Image (cartoon, grey):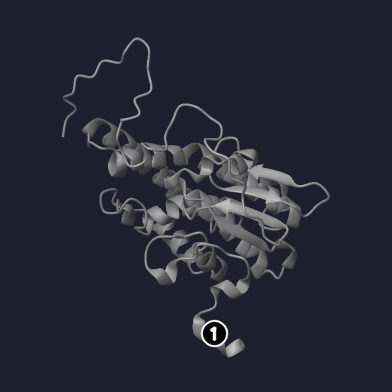
Amino acid sequence: MSDTTGYTPPKVWTWDTESGGRFASINRPIAGATHEKELPVGDHPFQLYSLATPNGVKVTVMFEELLELGISDAEYDAWTINISEGEQFSSGFVAINPNSKIPALLDRSGDTPVRVFESGSILVHLAEKFGHFLPKDPAARTEAFNWLFWQMGSAPFLGGGFGHFYAYAPEKFEYPINRYAMEVKRQLDVLDKHLAENHFLAGEEYSIADMAVWSWYGALVRGLLYEAGEFLSVSEYTHVVRWADEIAQRPAVKRGIRVNKVWGEESTQMRERHSADDFKTPAETASAD
Protein backbone atom coordinates (compact mmCIF):
# COMPACT_ATOMS: atom_id res chain seq x y z
CA MET A 1 0.00 0.00 0.00
CA SER A 2 1.40 3.39 -0.91
CA ASP A 3 1.09 6.50 1.27
CA THR A 4 -1.66 8.64 -0.21
CA THR A 5 -2.71 10.85 2.68
CA GLY A 6 -0.75 13.86 1.53
CA TYR A 7 -0.16 14.80 5.17
CA THR A 8 1.49 18.18 5.71
CA PRO A 9 2.99 18.73 9.19
CA PRO A 10 1.53 21.76 10.95
CA LYS A 11 3.74 24.70 11.78
CA VAL A 12 3.45 23.82 15.50
CA TRP A 13 2.76 20.25 16.63
CA THR A 14 0.01 19.72 19.21
CA TRP A 15 -0.86 16.59 21.16
CA ASP A 16 -3.69 14.63 19.55
CA THR A 17 -4.92 12.30 22.29
CA GLU A 18 -7.07 10.44 19.75
CA SER A 19 -4.13 9.48 17.55
CA GLY A 20 -5.01 5.78 17.67
CA GLY A 21 -2.83 2.71 17.83
CA ARG A 22 -2.53 0.03 20.49
CA PHE A 23 -0.75 2.23 23.02
CA ALA A 24 -2.48 5.53 22.27
CA SER A 25 -4.12 5.67 25.68
CA ILE A 26 -0.79 5.71 27.54
CA ASN A 27 1.43 7.66 25.15
CA ARG A 28 1.84 11.29 26.06
CA PRO A 29 4.37 14.10 25.52
CA ILE A 30 4.81 14.91 29.21
CA ALA A 31 6.60 13.19 32.10
CA GLY A 32 5.76 12.61 35.74
CA ALA A 33 3.21 10.73 37.79
CA THR A 34 -0.46 10.64 36.90
CA HIS A 35 -1.63 9.17 40.20
CA GLU A 36 -0.48 8.43 43.73
CA LYS A 37 0.33 4.81 44.45
CA GLU A 38 3.14 3.20 46.38
CA LEU A 39 4.90 0.14 45.01
CA PRO A 40 4.75 -3.22 46.82
CA VAL A 41 7.92 -4.33 48.58
CA GLY A 42 8.99 -7.90 49.32
CA ASP A 43 11.60 -9.46 51.56
CA HIS A 44 14.57 -9.81 49.20
CA PRO A 45 17.48 -7.40 48.62
CA PHE A 46 16.32 -6.63 45.09
CA GLN A 47 12.88 -5.34 44.17
CA LEU A 48 12.16 -5.51 40.45
CA TYR A 49 9.19 -3.76 38.87
CA SER A 50 8.73 -4.98 35.35
CA LEU A 51 6.85 -6.84 32.63
CA ALA A 52 8.01 -9.70 30.41
CA THR A 53 8.59 -7.57 27.33
CA PRO A 54 12.02 -7.87 25.66
CA ASN A 55 13.41 -5.13 27.90
CA GLY A 56 12.01 -6.75 31.02
CA VAL A 57 13.22 -10.23 30.08
CA LYS A 58 16.84 -9.06 30.00
CA VAL A 59 16.81 -8.45 33.74
CA THR A 60 14.85 -11.48 34.90
CA VAL A 61 17.16 -13.69 32.84
CA MET A 62 20.15 -12.01 34.49
CA PHE A 63 18.78 -12.62 37.98
CA GLU A 64 17.99 -16.24 37.19
CA GLU A 65 21.46 -16.77 35.69
CA LEU A 66 23.04 -15.44 38.88
CA LEU A 67 20.86 -17.70 41.00
CA GLU A 68 21.72 -20.64 38.73
CA LEU A 69 25.34 -20.08 39.78
CA GLY A 70 24.29 -20.49 43.40
CA ILE A 71 24.51 -16.79 44.30
CA SER A 72 21.80 -16.58 46.94
CA ASP A 73 22.46 -12.86 47.49
CA ALA A 74 20.85 -12.27 44.08
CA GLU A 75 17.42 -13.31 45.33
CA TYR A 76 14.76 -10.91 44.14
CA ASP A 77 11.08 -10.07 44.21
CA ALA A 78 9.56 -9.36 40.80
CA TRP A 79 6.38 -7.31 40.65
CA THR A 80 4.30 -6.85 37.52
CA ILE A 81 3.84 -3.36 36.13
CA ASN A 82 0.93 -3.38 33.70
CA ILE A 83 2.01 -0.78 31.16
CA SER A 84 -1.26 -1.04 29.25
CA GLU A 85 -3.03 0.20 32.38
CA GLY A 86 -0.56 3.02 32.97
CA GLU A 87 0.91 1.58 36.18
CA GLN A 88 4.32 2.92 35.14
CA PHE A 89 2.98 6.41 35.82
CA SER A 90 2.31 5.82 39.51
CA SER A 91 4.14 8.04 41.98
CA GLY A 92 5.99 5.02 43.37
CA PHE A 93 7.25 3.86 40.00
CA VAL A 94 8.21 7.35 38.81
CA ALA A 95 10.28 7.76 41.99
CA ILE A 96 12.45 4.84 40.82
CA ASN A 97 12.32 5.59 37.10
CA PRO A 98 11.45 9.16 36.13
CA ASN A 99 11.30 7.96 32.51
CA SER A 100 8.28 5.73 33.33
CA LYS A 101 9.57 2.70 31.43
CA ILE A 102 10.03 -0.87 32.63
CA PRO A 103 12.14 -2.39 34.03
CA ALA A 104 13.03 -0.51 37.20
CA LEU A 105 15.03 -1.91 40.11
CA LEU A 106 15.46 -0.96 43.74
CA ASP A 107 18.68 -2.38 45.17
CA ARG A 108 18.36 -2.59 48.96
CA SER A 109 21.42 -4.76 49.50
CA GLY A 110 23.49 -1.92 50.95
CA ASP A 111 23.03 0.64 53.67
CA THR A 112 21.25 3.02 51.32
CA PRO A 113 18.71 1.86 48.72
CA VAL A 114 19.85 2.53 45.15
CA ARG A 115 17.47 3.00 42.26
CA VAL A 116 18.55 1.59 38.91
CA PHE A 117 16.63 2.23 35.72
CA GLU A 118 17.16 1.44 32.04
CA SER A 119 17.66 -2.25 31.31
CA GLY A 120 21.28 -1.88 30.20
CA SER A 121 22.17 -0.01 33.37
CA ILE A 122 20.55 -2.73 35.48
CA LEU A 123 22.53 -5.45 33.67
CA VAL A 124 25.81 -3.61 34.22
CA HIS A 125 24.92 -2.88 37.85
CA LEU A 126 24.28 -6.55 38.60
CA ALA A 127 27.26 -7.81 36.58
CA GLU A 128 29.65 -5.51 38.43
CA LYS A 129 28.06 -6.16 41.81
CA PHE A 130 28.35 -9.94 41.56
CA GLY A 131 31.33 -10.26 39.24
CA HIS A 132 29.67 -12.46 36.64
CA PHE A 133 28.58 -12.24 33.00
CA LEU A 134 30.97 -9.43 32.17
CA PRO A 135 34.36 -10.68 30.89
CA LYS A 136 37.44 -9.98 32.99
CA ASP A 137 39.71 -9.72 29.96
CA PRO A 138 39.77 -6.01 28.99
CA ALA A 139 39.32 -6.62 25.26
CA ALA A 140 36.42 -9.04 25.76
CA ARG A 141 34.87 -6.73 28.35
CA THR A 142 34.96 -3.86 25.87
CA GLU A 143 33.46 -6.11 23.19
CA ALA A 144 30.61 -6.98 25.55
CA PHE A 145 29.95 -3.28 26.10
CA ASN A 146 30.14 -2.70 22.33
CA TRP A 147 27.27 -5.10 21.73
CA LEU A 148 25.32 -4.06 24.80
CA PHE A 149 25.27 -0.46 23.61
CA TRP A 150 24.68 -1.60 20.03
CA GLN A 151 21.46 -3.14 21.28
CA MET A 152 20.45 0.02 23.12
CA GLY A 153 20.84 2.06 19.95
CA SER A 154 19.47 -0.52 17.52
CA ALA A 155 16.40 -2.00 19.20
CA PRO A 156 14.35 1.23 19.00
CA PHE A 157 14.38 0.80 15.22
CA LEU A 158 13.10 -2.76 15.70
CA GLY A 159 10.50 -1.97 18.37
CA GLY A 160 9.39 1.62 18.06
CA GLY A 161 10.09 1.62 14.32
CA PHE A 162 9.34 -1.67 12.61
CA GLY A 163 7.21 -3.18 15.38
CA HIS A 164 5.03 -0.11 15.70
CA PHE A 165 4.29 0.40 12.01
CA TYR A 166 4.06 -3.32 11.18
CA ALA A 167 2.06 -4.53 14.17
CA TYR A 168 0.53 -1.69 16.19
CA ALA A 169 -0.14 1.37 14.03
CA PRO A 170 -3.84 1.94 13.30
CA GLU A 171 -3.08 2.09 9.57
CA LYS A 172 -0.51 0.27 7.42
CA PHE A 173 1.66 2.38 5.15
CA GLU A 174 4.31 1.13 2.75
CA TYR A 175 7.04 3.69 3.39
CA PRO A 176 7.58 3.30 7.18
CA ILE A 177 7.22 -0.49 7.05
CA ASN A 178 9.71 -0.78 4.20
CA ARG A 179 12.08 1.72 5.81
CA TYR A 180 12.22 -0.08 9.14
CA ALA A 181 12.11 -3.60 7.67
CA MET A 182 15.22 -2.70 5.68
CA GLU A 183 16.96 -1.45 8.83
CA VAL A 184 16.01 -4.51 10.90
CA LYS A 185 17.33 -6.82 8.19
CA ARG A 186 20.55 -4.81 8.09
CA GLN A 187 20.88 -5.25 11.85
CA LEU A 188 20.26 -8.98 11.59
CA ASP A 189 22.97 -9.16 8.95
CA VAL A 190 25.37 -7.32 11.26
CA LEU A 191 24.66 -9.90 13.97
CA ASP A 192 24.84 -12.83 11.58
CA LYS A 193 28.24 -11.88 10.20
CA HIS A 194 29.61 -11.39 13.72
CA LEU A 195 28.18 -14.64 15.07
CA ALA A 196 29.60 -16.54 12.09
CA GLU A 197 32.99 -15.98 13.70
CA ASN A 198 32.05 -15.88 17.40
CA HIS A 199 30.24 -18.29 19.70
CA PHE A 200 28.74 -15.47 21.73
CA LEU A 201 28.75 -11.73 21.16
CA ALA A 202 31.89 -11.03 23.21
CA GLY A 203 33.66 -14.16 21.99
CA GLU A 204 33.56 -17.50 23.77
CA GLU A 205 32.01 -16.14 26.97
CA TYR A 206 28.27 -15.70 27.49
CA SER A 207 27.64 -12.21 28.85
CA ILE A 208 25.11 -9.49 29.55
CA ALA A 209 25.50 -8.48 25.91
CA ASP A 210 23.94 -11.78 24.86
CA MET A 211 21.11 -11.39 27.36
CA ALA A 212 20.31 -7.91 26.07
CA VAL A 213 20.48 -8.68 22.37
CA TRP A 214 18.80 -12.10 22.68
CA SER A 215 15.71 -10.64 24.33
CA TRP A 216 14.96 -8.70 21.14
CA TYR A 217 16.70 -10.36 18.20
CA GLY A 218 16.58 -13.87 19.59
CA ALA A 219 12.83 -13.56 20.00
CA LEU A 220 12.56 -12.18 16.48
CA VAL A 221 14.39 -15.02 14.74
CA ARG A 222 12.56 -17.60 16.86
CA GLY A 223 9.23 -16.25 15.60
CA LEU A 224 8.13 -14.75 18.91
CA LEU A 225 8.13 -11.05 18.04
CA TYR A 226 5.43 -9.29 15.99
CA GLU A 227 4.72 -12.53 14.06
CA ALA A 228 7.15 -11.09 11.54
CA GLY A 229 9.57 -13.97 11.05
CA GLU A 230 8.33 -14.96 7.60
CA PHE A 231 7.96 -11.34 6.49
CA LEU A 232 11.59 -10.64 7.37
CA SER A 233 12.88 -14.03 6.18
CA VAL A 234 14.67 -14.52 9.50
CA SER A 235 15.62 -18.13 8.76
CA GLU A 236 18.31 -16.91 6.38
CA TYR A 237 20.31 -15.56 9.34
CA THR A 238 21.54 -19.01 10.27
CA HIS A 239 24.22 -17.92 12.74
CA VAL A 240 21.77 -15.73 14.66
CA VAL A 241 19.30 -18.62 14.74
CA ARG A 242 22.01 -20.98 16.06
CA TRP A 243 22.95 -18.52 18.80
CA ALA A 244 19.32 -17.75 19.70
CA ASP A 245 18.32 -21.40 19.95
CA GLU A 246 21.32 -22.25 22.13
CA ILE A 247 20.60 -19.48 24.60
CA ALA A 248 16.91 -20.43 24.71
CA GLN A 249 17.90 -23.84 26.10
CA ARG A 250 19.62 -22.42 29.18
CA PRO A 251 17.62 -23.32 32.35
CA ALA A 252 17.90 -19.77 33.73
CA VAL A 253 16.61 -18.33 30.47
CA LYS A 254 13.64 -20.68 30.49
CA ARG A 255 12.77 -19.40 33.96
CA GLY A 256 13.54 -15.76 33.27
CA ILE A 257 11.22 -15.42 30.30
CA ARG A 258 8.28 -16.54 32.47
CA VAL A 259 8.70 -13.91 35.18
CA ASN A 260 6.15 -11.08 34.99
CA LYS A 261 4.52 -12.70 31.97
CA VAL A 262 0.76 -12.22 32.00
CA TRP A 263 -0.26 -13.42 28.53
CA GLY A 264 -0.13 -16.62 26.52
CA GLU A 265 -0.67 -20.14 27.85
CA GLU A 266 -1.25 -20.18 31.59
CA SER A 267 1.64 -22.60 32.14
CA THR A 268 4.05 -19.99 30.72
CA GLN A 269 2.85 -17.15 32.93
CA MET A 270 4.15 -15.92 36.27
CA ARG A 271 2.67 -12.62 37.39
CA GLU A 272 5.01 -12.28 40.37
CA ARG A 273 8.16 -14.06 41.42
CA HIS A 274 9.30 -14.24 45.04
CA SER A 275 11.29 -17.48 45.31
CA ALA A 276 12.61 -20.41 43.33
CA ASP A 277 9.60 -22.39 44.56
CA ASP A 278 7.39 -20.27 42.33
CA PHE A 279 8.68 -22.25 39.35
CA LYS A 280 7.61 -25.59 40.78
CA THR A 281 4.57 -27.32 39.36
CA PRO A 282 1.67 -28.05 41.76
CA ALA A 283 2.76 -31.71 41.82
CA GLU A 284 6.33 -30.76 42.74
CA THR A 285 5.08 -28.45 45.47
CA ALA A 286 2.82 -31.16 46.89
CA SER A 287 5.61 -33.76 46.92
CA ALA A 288 7.85 -31.38 48.86
CA ASP A 289 5.28 -30.88 51.61
Answer left or right for 33 relative to 187.
Answer: right
Residue 197 in view here? no
**In x, y percent, where is residue 206?**
60, 59
Does the rendering let one see residue 48? yes
Q: Where is residue 116 in the image (x, y as percent from the top left)?
A: 66, 44
For image coordinates 37% across by 16% down, the residue present is: 13
Answer with left or right where residue 71 lies relative to residue 68.
Answer: right
- In this view, the residue in front, 11 or 41, is 41
Q: In which quarter of the image is the C terminus?
A: bottom right
Other residues around mark 1 within 10 Å, as few (<14) / some (14–19) / many (≥20): few
Residue 284 percent across, percent down from the top left: 54, 85
Instruction: Tell me the quarter of the image containing the N terminus.
Output: top left
Q: Report the front residue among 107 and 238.
A: 107
Q: Is residue 260 above or below residue 169?
A: below
Q: Which residue is pictured at 73% across the width and 45% down the height?
A: 114
Residue drawn at x 47%, y 39% is 154
Q: Where is residue 125 in the image (x, y as percent from the top left)?
A: 69, 48
What amino acid type is highlighted by mark number 1? Glu
Q: Mark 1 points at which residue?
A: 284
Outermost residue, top direction? 11
Left or right side of 210 for 173: left
